[in-house]
Each structure stands twice: as structure tokens, then as C-alpha cells.
Image (tube, helix red, strand yellow):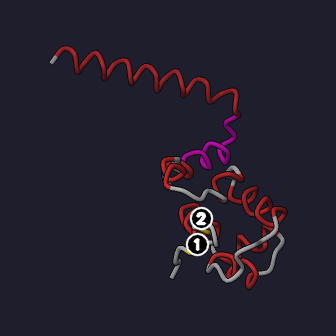
Amino acid sequence: MHEILEDKNGVCLMIGRNIYEIRMKKGFTLSELAERAGISKSYLSNIERNLNQNPSIQVIRKIAQVLDVDLKILIKTGPNDEEQQLPDKEWIDLANEFKKSGIEKNQIQEFKQLIEFIKWQNQNMDTKK
């Protein structure tokens, strides 16, 4: 469905595929993403299916903003870019739960300290074995 096309220089045109994959990982429907980005559903569908291989940077920027990813993630073109991974849906859900429960960004530092302690504890347990 989401074939990888190449331009005349052999560069992969993967913007549509990237948008589709990120949208699915983040749990957005095509309609939700289109509405939040302020573009038509059919236009977004054409981008995802690589029928529109040259969307404007303004449109891509809107989509990136709604998906909460860096613009570079959407326009990545090569295998080196594949190494950048998105957080799992569970981590995104956890972050959304933090927001819903009223936990502020400054309070997240406490969770980071707890995580560091758990890592330290796990390392020490590994060395004792």
C-alpha cells in the first residue's frame, strides 16, 4: 500500500509513508490528523499514498506539529534516518496520563531521579550476581 518511490536522483520519497507510520503509532485516524492540521482528508490521504509527492513545507510543518515530531522525522529519506526511533505508544500514553493528572514538567524531574535510582539499583544487582 505504501510503496517507496524514488525521484530522478534515486532519493526515496518516503514522506507519505513516514506520516502514515507515525500517525498510526500515535493513534490518530486520517480524519483526526487532517482536521487538526487544517487540511482536507483527501489531501492527506494523497500525501500518505504518495499520490501527492510534493506537499508544501507549510503543510508538512502543520502535520509535524500535530504529530508532535520534528519536521526532519517526516522528511527523512535514507536508512540512517531509520535509526531515529519514535517512542512506543505505551510511553506516549504514559506522558498523556501525566498531562491529564496535572503533573507539571518541573515535577517530572522527580520521576527522572527515580528512574536513575532504579537503573543504579539494577546495575548493582547485576554486579552482585
- In the image, the segment drawn in magenta is 94-104
Residue at 53 percent across and 47 percent down: it is: 84
What amino acid type is highlighted by mark number 2? Val
Residue 6 badge: 1
What amino acid type is highlighted by mark number 1? Glu
The image quarter containing residue 37 is bottom right
Residue 128 vs 53, above or below: the answer is: above
Residue at 62 percent across and 49 percent down: it is: 96
Q: x, y (%) of residue 107?
A: 65, 27
Residue 110 vs 11, above or below: the answer is: above
Residue 4 among those drawn in magenta: no
Residue at 24 percent across and 19 percent down: it is: 125
Residue 98 vs 88, above or below: the answer is: above
Earlier in the chain: of badge 2 and badge 1, it is 1
Q: x, y (%) of residue 126?
A: 23, 21
Q: Are marks 2 and 1 in contact (CB under 8 Å)?
A: yes
Q: What secondary structure is the magenta-colored segment mainly?
A: helix
Residue at 43 percent across and 19 percent down: it is: 117
Q: Is residue 64 left or right of residue 110?
A: right
- What element does badge 1 sit on? strand
Residue 96 among those drawn in magenta: yes
Residue 42 vs 35, above or below: the answer is: below
Residue 11 badge: 2
The image quarter containing residue 5 is bottom right
Q: x, y (%) of residue 21?
A: 55, 66
Q: Is residue 80 left or right of residue 32?
A: left
Categorize mark 2 by other alpha carbons within 10 Å: few (<14), some (14-19), many (20+). Answer: few
Depth check: 82 or 125 in front? 82
- What element does badge 2 sit on? loop
